[in-house]
Amino acid sequence: MLECKVFAANDLRVVDVETPSPGPGEVLIRLGAAGICGSDMHYFFHGAVGSFRIREPLTPGHEASGTVAAVGEGVTRVRPGQRIAINPSRACGQCAGCREGRENLCSNMRFLGSASVFPHMQGMFREYFTMPQQQCVPVDSDVSMQEIAMSEPLSVALHSVHRAGDLLGKSVLITGSGTIGCMMVIAARLAGARSITVTDVVDHPLDVARQVGADRTVRTDQLAQGTTLASIAGEPDVAFEVSGAPQALISCLETVRRGGIIVQVGTLPVDGMHLPANLVMQREIDLRGSFRFGHVFEHAVQAIASRRVDVRPVISASHSLADAQAAMHLARDKTRSMKVHLVPA
């Protein structure tokens, strides 16, 4: 079977390895579709994501769907032939974070396709892989494998909305209209947001943001000198910073209303940034973090499977595993693509 491995920056190899067998409580899964995330691209192009550096060959991939090929002894959650979404989070269930119901903050988290621990947690850019049954969520609908694989990014957005609190009737600003930005639009609309403004510096993702429900889009790099974002979008009740750009976070601080809420979703530069923190004090802004997701994954799966939400506008292309490098380069080009998936040959 084929498996994609990143050995170092710009060193991705598609290798032929043996197909694994499921042990007790495990499921053998044939890949349906695996989305290329920003973190996967960082591992490929830079050999690291923030402070998580590749120290051994890493198989990326944490957004995936598949079909159950076989099950090990004791598996009751899924059956052979069934289509599934795979939750990439494997929390310990025992640490303080887990006991508080915040499993995304688990101090012993094992997250697929991540170099955050050593040995690394190998991901799902491979034709077959095994997974504990508790990470497999059955899907009994006719949505595509690519749509099912969008459950993970939608989970990130649902968790971020939860971190913001009640959005019913609120005005929302989202800085960054990549995949997560568009998932934020969907999640905020699902939560009852009254109006949603999305900003970016590239036209194509803003076009997609409008397709999934944004009321207003703004090219912030084209604002006339002296024009503020607030003069166009008003002062939103809640802002979600998704781009990971320092200037975007500053823009949120300057634009959100007094007493408003900002949720930091994007990954900022690892070496830090200049933050006008007095704005937090003077305007009594709540600045909150949002990391991965907790107990929302199955909700995301069901929302997609029932087409309560439509993620199809965000899906751009599919490439075979053998063409993983080309797929990475396409995924990086935001003028042409949004979510690019890898699929079996």
Image (cartoon, grey):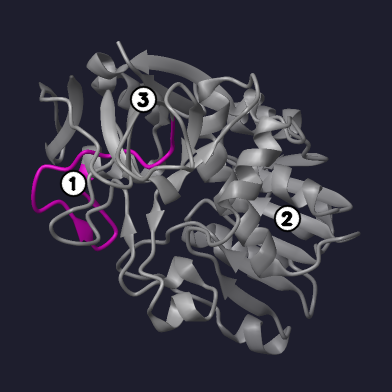
Residue 154 falls in image quadrant: top right
Predominant SS along the magenta part = loop
Q: At x 42% / y 25%, what residue is drawn?
A: 80
Question: Which mark, by number, is residue 47?
Answer: 1
**Considering only vertical position in the picture, is 334 above or below 49?**
above
Report the residue marked by disc 3: 31
Q: Provide residue 171's location: percent of width, then percent of height.
A: 84, 58
Q: Earlier in the sequence, mark 3 or mark 2?
A: 3
* Residue 225 is at least partly visible in this image: yes
CB contact under 8 Å: marks 2 and 1: no
**Considering only vertical position in the picture, is 38 above or below 92?**
above
Q: At x 32% / y 48%, what residue is drawn?
A: 112
CA gap between label 3 and label 1 equals: 24 Å
Q: Is residue 56 left or right of residue 141?
A: left
Q: At x 48% / y 80%, what residue is drawn?
A: 99
Q: Is residue 210 left or right of residue 201?
A: right
Of all residues shown, which one is farthest toward the top? Answer: 345
**Considering only vertical position in the picture, is 4 above or below 157?**
above
Q: Secondary structure at mark 1?
A: loop
User: What amino acid type is highlighted by mark number 3?
Assistant: Leu
CB contact under 8 Å: marks 3 and 1: no
Is 55 contained in the magenta span?
yes
Residue 38 falls in image quadrant: top left
Q: Secondary structure at mark 3?
A: strand
Q: Residues within 10 Å of mark 3 (few under 14, many from 20)?
A: many
Q: Provide residue 298's location: percent of width, then percent of height.
A: 60, 48
Position of the N terminus, as image quadrant, is top left
Query: Which contiguous range is marked in magenta?
Result: 46-65
